[in-house]
Image (tube, rainbow, N blue to C red):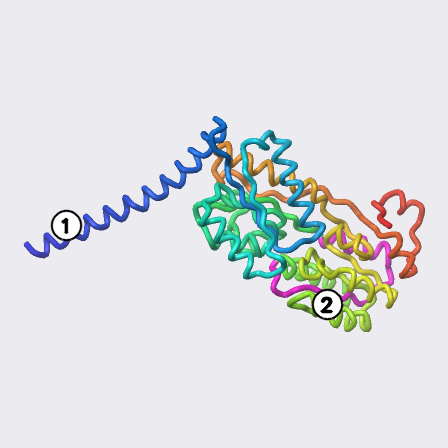
Amino acid sequence: MKKVLAIIAILAMVSVLTACVTDAKTKDTEGLAADREDAANGNEKIKIGIVQPVEHPSLNQIREYIIIGLEEEGLKDRVEITYKDAQGDPSNINTIVSQFVGDEMDIIVPIGTGASQSAAAATKEIPIIFAAVSYPVDAGLVKDVNKPEANVTGVSDAIDVEQIFDLAFELTPNIETFGFIYNTGETNSVSAINKAKEYCKTKGIKYAEATITNSSELLQAAQSLVERTDAIFTPTDNTVATAMPILSAEAQKAGIPVYTGADSMIIDGGFATVGIDYTVLGRQVAKMVKKVIEGEEISNIPTETLSEYSAIVNKSTAEKIGVDLSEEQLKRFQIVE
């Protein structure tokens, strides 16, 4: 009899715990639904937290056009946006995300891979719409880009590495050895560099690499590469981007081109890229946020990758490293000075 009573007691406890878990999930769902209804009635705004790893032109542009996109989608008066910058410190990202979770944000929008990983680790309930994560599967954010299974989706800024290298050999065909410079702690950079290595192996091109962990190491890494390579490639690497003028200056002194993954890095003295239009990316993220606000489940919102690329060349850098651009190229490419 005692055994029977014990079993009944255990089953009762399991039943209570199951009910609590179900109730918690229901409350999360109902809470966002209630906030949506309140926002629609003008009673309360949907709270959106945007976290950015560091101040940088490309990342700033993404943030600005997420906000512009939300306004264009008619959500200006329905949302309350809180923006925080981690100032280049990964530990700050975790603190910011924890604050967003504690403040019960309705939606979190992390910009970049590291911020998105932190957000995904911090909450399994709050919808997360990432911006500019180059390789979301490699980053562990989704298993299936076509049908996200958890609370995470977003817009990828994956660069077409092959197109960048094809451009490199059009503009500077005599490259024998490529140099790669990147932060090994940035998942998106590692994935892009692996693709670059595959390209070089397929084409029989030699390569060398210099890795960094913070921007203060960039000068020494750049100096080591320019001595043994004919051109340098760096992907959409936030660490390199924050100190891009240093890399550009060293490469220009050596007379070698730097090919990059982002247009802002060309503006900062890099030579050329086939890059992303981050104004388009920001607006795409805003459209995803609107879908969540309107009640669509994350699992029904596939991750997206931009298909709009443009070849961008820095004319001033071309002159400094002795590359002559033809009239046809000047017309075909997007030229920055």
Residue beneath disc 1: 8
Quarter of the image where the N terminus is located: bottom left
The kind of residue tagged 1 is: Ile
Tell me the element at label 1.
helix
Q: Residues within 10 Å of mark 2 (few under 14, many from 20)?
A: many
Sequence order check, earlier mark of 1 and 2: 1
Residues 246 and 55: in front is 55
Q: Is residue 330 visible?
A: yes
Q: Residues within 10 Å of mark 1 (few under 14, many from 20)?
A: few
- Residue shown at the point (60%, 29%) measured from the top left: 74
Q: Residue 295 at what x, y percent from top left?
A: 48, 33
Indicate whether residue 186 is drawn in magenta. yes
- Residue shown at the point (83%, 61%) measured from the top left: 257
Please, is residue 40 above or below residue 230 in the view? above
Q: Farthest residue in the front direction?
A: 43
- Residue shown at the point (84%, 48%) measured from the top left: 336
Q: How many marks?
A: 2
Please, is residue 1 above or below residue 288 in the view? below
Please, is residue 125 above or below residue 208 in the view? above
Question: In this rendering, which labeled residue sits more in front, label 1 or label 2?
Answer: 2
Magenta extent: 161-187
Tell me the element at label 2.
helix
Residues 259 and 91: in front is 91
The kind of residue tagged 2 is: Leu
Q: Residue 323 at what x, y percent from top left?
A: 91, 57
Residue beneath disc 2: 218
Q: Residue 178 at what x, y percent from top left?
A: 78, 65
Q: Is residue 16 left or right of residue 314?
A: left
Q: Within the image, what quadrant is residue 199 found in?
A: bottom right
